[in-house]
Amino acid sequence: MTKAFPTIQDVARVAKVSTATVSRALSFPERVSKETRRVVIDAIERTGYTVNQTARNLRRKQSGAIVVLVPNLGNPFFSKILSGIEATASREGLNVLIADTRQPQVSPRLIGEYLHANRADGLILLDGALRPDLIPGAPGKRPPIVYCCEWNEDNDLPSVRFDNSGGAALAVRHLHDLGHRRIGHILGPADNVLTKEREHGVRCTLDALGLEARRDWFFEGDFSLAAGARAAAQWLALDERPTAVAAANDEMACGFISGLHRAGVSVPDDVSVVGFDDIDIADQFIPALTTVRQPRSEIGESAATALIERIRGGGADAAEMKTLAAELIVRSSTRTA
């Protein structure tokens, strides 16, 4: 005889609640207490009950999916953020769709058409250059939107971000504590909000420490390995060189170190280098990279949680900002001057 599949009645019996309560906990979790939801989820796991997501989403008039827009899927920085988003969305029964905004086909018009077709319940933007007000359609009819990592000052939207200025300050103070007084900086893209925040942190800290922020010690970059290598060539061409360099991200720090290595310059013996982000390769690079760590999984989880709260009506309409604290990870790419 074929074993019957567990039903919602089985879940209610194990959880010792009514079937109506089980249904509310699954379809409208904001209407039940956290303890009730925990009891129901535990009963689902014990019985092996499978939620009919399609029926659930139809009741709620939702698609059961969220869209995440990333400025460069090839950048390893985004991996753990996306993992955090996926894990949180999955726990709540939501699918995650990811698009690379660098691809020409991912236009505001295409995004607008996708959202208006009710294919997504919400949007997480990791690209601060993409302005939601340019997405076709009345703002009141668009699903909830949350910025993650990057943001746009012209839009009054909730955001989850990192203390970029504070992280840059940690990097400069670390180099100062090691005795460095000539400190340079590799900038990110000129139009990027993270570049501005990190440069601000560097300049303010140099000023507070009474150190000079020389123009020729600030190297233009774009967050790529190649930009770091170009900065190395510029450093080599200087008559008076900084003894330490703080890069606006790890990829440029690695490109800078590699470019110097090819020229016979040793890091950290000849120059100390600090990165920013703590991507996976940072501790495996030679030398292991001193860097500012971003809690990337937590950033992704927080952004997904904020979006889901708004999708389900539990989040505030007004813009909110959550800023996660900076942490310096000291490795082998820095030493005393």
Image (spheres, helix red, strand yellow):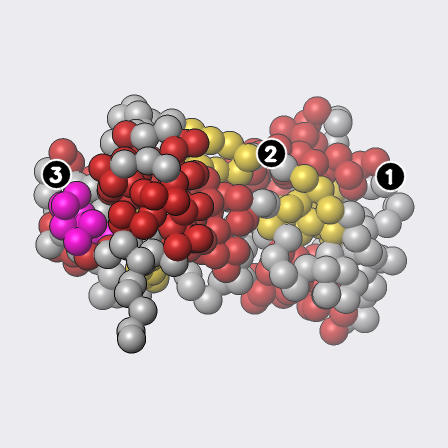
| Residue 9 vertical placement versus 288 (above, below) | above
Residue at the extreme front of the image, as rendered: 1
Q: Sequence-wise, which precedes: disc 1 or disc 3?
A: 3
Residue at 30% over, 25% down? 316
Left or right of 76: which side holds 270? Answer: right
Residue placed most toward the observer, 32 or 290: 32
* Element marked by disc 3: helix
- Whether label 1 touches label 3, CB < 8 Å: no
Residue at 42% over, 63% down? 73
Residue 54: where, in percent of width, then height? Answer: 19, 57
Q: Which residue is mark 2?
A: 325
Q: Which residue is mark 3?
A: 141
Q: Main secondary structure of the magenta part?
A: helix
Mark on residue 179?
Answer: 1
Amino acid type of the residue that numbered disc 2 sits on in the rendered structure: Ala
Q: Residues within 10 Å of mark 3 (few under 14, many from 20)?
A: few
Residue interval drawn in magenta = 55-64
Q: Sequence-wise, which precedes: disc 2 or disc 1?
A: 1
Would residue 66 be visible to someone looking at this image?
A: no
Amino acid type of the residue that numbered disc 3 sits on in the rendered structure: Lys
Q: Is residue 63 inside the magenta stretch?
A: yes
Label 3, label 2: how far apart the Cα atoms are: 34 Å
Would residue 163 be visible to someone looking at this image?
A: yes
* Element marked by disc 2: loop
Label 1, label 3: how far apart the Cα atoms are: 56 Å
Mark 2 vs mark 1: in front = 2
